[in-house]
Amino acid sequence: MKIIKLGLTGSIGMGKTRTTLMFKNLGIPVFDADKKVHELFDKNIKLIKLIEKNFDGVVKNNYVNRKILGNIVFQNKKKKEILENLVHPFVRIERNKFTKSAIRNKFPIVLYDIPLLFETKSEKHYDHIIVVSASKFIQTKRVLNRAGMTNDIFKNINMSQISDYKKRSKADFIIYSGLGVAHAFKNVKLIIGKIRNYN
C-alpha cells in the first residue's frame, strides 16, 4: 500500500498549528517540523555542539538559548543559512523515522507540517501541497499578539519567507483559516475526502 504524503505550509500567523490539529483529530498522523527542531535543540547533543561551534554565546551547559539564536539569524542572512544547513539533516532523519513508522502502522495518509516547505524547495517530497492562508490584517493581529513579538521581528520573518500569494499559487489545496474554525474544519474534511478519491 502506497502512503500518501501531504505537505502543509503557510506563512507565520496563518493558522498552521490549529489546522494540523484538525488533521490529527481526523486520524491523520502529523509530523511537526518546528516542534521537532525544538526537541532537537533540547536533546540532540551532536546538534547542540554544532550550534555552539558556529554561534558564540548561544549555548551554555548544553542549553540552546533560542531567543539569542533567533536574534542572530533574523539579522544575518548568512548566519540563518548556516543554521538551516546544520538543522535540516537532523530534521530529515526524524522525518524519515516518522514516515517509516506510519508505513509500519499502515496509515494511508500522513501530514508533514513544514513552515519553510517552499523556501527549502522540498515540495517534491510530497504528493499534495496544502497552504494555510488568512488576510494580512488577521495575520498581523495574530502575530503581534505573541509574547516577545515586535513589528521589526515580524517584518524580518516575512522578508525571509516566500509571500503568501506565491505559496497559494503553488498549492494543490488552500485552507483559509480566517473564516472561522468550522469553515476551516469543513475544508480539511473535504480535502481528505478528495485525496482519498484521487488515490
Image (spheres, rainbow, N blue to C red):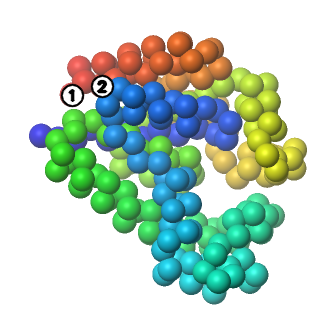
- Report the side of 69 relative to 184 (left or right): right
Across and down, in percent, residue 48 comes to: 56, 78
Contact, mark 1 vs mark 2 (Cβ under 8 Å):
yes
Q: CA distance from mark 1 to mark 2?
A: 6 Å
Q: Quadrant of residue 128?
A: top left
- In the rendered view, tell whether residue 175 sits above or below residue 107: above
Estimate how packed mark 2 is, as few (under 14), some (14 to 19) or many (20 or more) residues with alpha carbons within 10 Å.
some
Q: Quadrant of the N terminus?
A: top left
Amino acid type at image mark 2: Ile
Amino acid type at image mark 1: Asn
- In the rendered view, tell whether residue 136 sits above or below residue 162: above
Picture mark count: 2
Q: Which residue is mark 2?
A: 195
Q: Which residue is mark 1?
A: 199
- Report the side of 189 relative to 158 (left or right): left
Q: Is residue 159 visible?
A: no
* Residue in view at x 71 percent, y 23 percent: 135
